[in-house]
Image: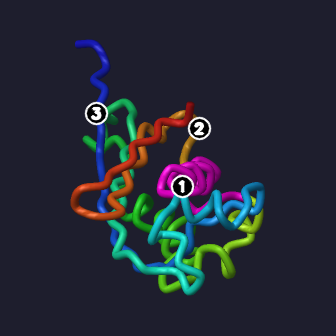
């Protein structure tokens, strides 16, 4: 029998605040583009992240990856740097990058990719709200 490929996903929630503001745009342009999300005092979200890894289903363990290991990677790459943080002030990455959900998904991808086995990370899906969702696959 050929080797089977499986996908496993772990869901994690965290809370953070941010302000959508680009230092490369004028205050007026920021207000026009980002609207209420450009509020100088920021605003918060209860984010939900789905981390999906892909790999061969090990014939001895029956697993693509041990979920305990995946949970530990999520703790390091997502929870420690992001949970209960001001993304713009507490996370150095966002000093020069607008803290959109698109850029947040890239930040999470980069952090997870450093901790997981090579080429195993398949997808990061970030729910900013129930209606606003970003998918990033490392491209």
Of residues 128 and 69, the one drawn nearer to the viewer in this rendering: 128
* Residue 105 belongs to the span the image colors magenta: yes
The residue identified by callout 1 is 33
Q: Name the residue under label 3.
A: 6
How far apart marks 3 and 2 lie (CA) works out to 16 Å
**Among the 4 quarters of the image, the one containing residue 62:** top left
Q: Where does the image place residue 106, in percent across and percent down from the top left?
A: 57, 49
Say whether disc 3 or disc 2 marks the residue closer to the N-terminus.
3
Which residue is at a point 47% across and 56% down the rendered structure image?
Answer: 101
Label drawn at residue 69: none
Residue 86, image x and y in percent? 58, 82
- Report the residue at 36% width, 60% height from top: 49
Question: Vertical placement of 137 versus 1: above or below?
Answer: below
Q: To which residue does mark 2 refer?
A: 118
Quadrant holding the C terminus: top right
User: Residue 15, position in %: x, y?
Assistant: 41, 80
Name the secondary structure under disc 3. strand
| SS of the residue under disc 1 | helix
Reading the chain from its start, which is encountered first: label 2 or label 1?
Answer: 1
**Disc 2 or disc 1, which is closer to the eye?**
1
Give yes or no for residue 138 being in the magenta stretch: no
Region of the chain picked out in magenta, as a range? 97-115
């Amino acid at each position: 029998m050929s080797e089977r490929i499986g996908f496993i996903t772990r869901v994690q929630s965290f809370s953070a605040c941010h302000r959508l503001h680009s230092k490369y745009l004028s205050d007026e342009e920021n207000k026009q583009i980002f609207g209420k999300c450009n509020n100088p005092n920021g605003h918060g979200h209860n984010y939900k992240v789905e981390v999906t890894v892909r790999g061969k289903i090990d014939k001895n363990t029956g697993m693509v990856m041990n979920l305990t290991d995946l949970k530990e990677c999520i703790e390091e790459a997502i929870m420690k740097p992001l949970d209960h943080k001001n993304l713009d002030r507490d996370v150095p990455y966002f000093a020069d990058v607008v803290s959109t959900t698109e850029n947040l998904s890239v930040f999470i991808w980069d952090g997870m990719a450093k901790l997981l086995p090579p080429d195993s990370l398949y997808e990061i899906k970030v729910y900013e709200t129930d209606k606003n969702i970003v998918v990033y696959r490392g491209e």
